[in-house]
Image: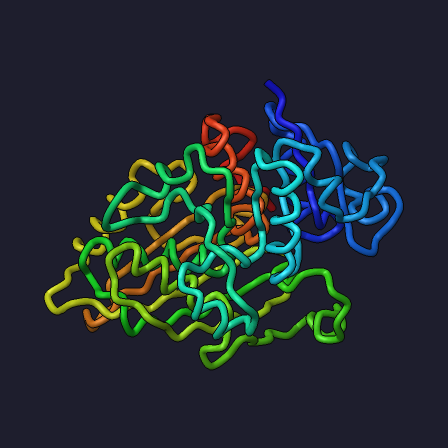
Amino acid sequence: MTVNVSVAGATGYAGGEVLRLLAGHPGLTVSSVCAGSSQGKLGQFQPHLRQYADRELEPTEPRILADSDVAILGLPHGKSAEIAAAILELNPSCILVDLGADHRLENPQDWEDFYGTPATDPWTYGMPELLRANGPSQRENLVGTRHIAAPGCNASAVTFAAQPAVAGGLTDGSGIVATLAVGYSGAGKALKSHLMASEAFGSAVPYGVGGTHRHIPEIAQNLRAAGGVTSTLSFTPVLVPMARGILATVSIPVTAGTTADDVTDAYRSAYADEKFVTYVDGFPTSSSVTGANTALVGAVLDRNRERLTAICAIDNLVKGTAGAALQALNLALGLPEDTGLIVNGVAP
């Protein structure tokens, strides 16, 4: 069976990465590529996607996106909910995958506090490896679902780094401090002065400082699912001169009496059966996961035994966005979870 997929936001980084992965997926076929203001052939905007270079861009309209089995929405935050509702009116059986944040948060107040607009209904969260203290696993929740909210890239990195400590009882999830080195593709393709090469090269630029970043409530939500009491955390992403990738360094307070073996055991057991999230001895680098749907996590008890430091490396466009979405979609369609996805990075 071939499943037809339409992609909105095809000229953006996230949409382009989805198309790159779809090109290698044996069960999914791209039926339409849509964009907002961009017109012409896709190759003008995504020259690396040779397989789709001659595809004509179509407008981002519900009637076009609804004419497929699956619609993947790579749209700015706040734009997916309205078009998703229109798609479902035209084709109620269409499976929807939102790469944006519109349907990630379960608490409407979290959305309104961080995004400033009315909240929409949450969809099934597209992180199969999310640890849940109660109820079915997140992987089970994704099987057969028709509405998927892909996770945020920064939120994914911090979640993978912190959730084993929460689920393993080493911490209650409070007092976490996360600092992330983030590649510039995480800021999108918008033409802004601080994103120009002349500004970026040789510089590191913090953003979303002081508890303002929109991924904070998503991370807190994930750690509560793992059994924590997390309501907020110190979270500071820093843009660094690389095209893609995230290296998250997460400092986590631990309960008295925690040993180095406790840390190793909690992290090894959390990811022992996972294909795409792996606990490693030592600490990962961002370059080791470039192009792969892989998260590498290392953790160590601090010398004073009051905190542990966990480091997670992901490719923000793959495991952080498009790869996670395709992994979740595979589960929704009843396909093997790893179909069309790779664990090997690109080096050098």
x and y percentages locating residue 320 in the rendered image: 52, 51
Residue 302 locus on image (x, y percent): 25, 68
Front residue (pair 172, 112): 112
The vertical placement of 133 against 68, above or below, is below
Q: Position of residue 223 (x, y in %)?
A: 32, 60
The correct choice, above or below, for 130 with respect to 240 in the image is above
Residue ID at (77%, 67%): 191
Direction front: furthest residue: 89
Dividing the image into 4 quarters, which one contains the N terminus? top right
Q: Is residue 175 above or below residue 2?
A: below
| Residue at image coords 63%, 29% | 24
Residue closest to the far right: 40
- Give residue 204's quadrant in the image: bottom right
Q: In the current view of this chain or complex, which residue is farthest to the top?
A: 1
Q: Position of residue 289 (x, y in %)?
A: 52, 47
Q: Nearer the viewer, residue 252 or 301?
A: 252
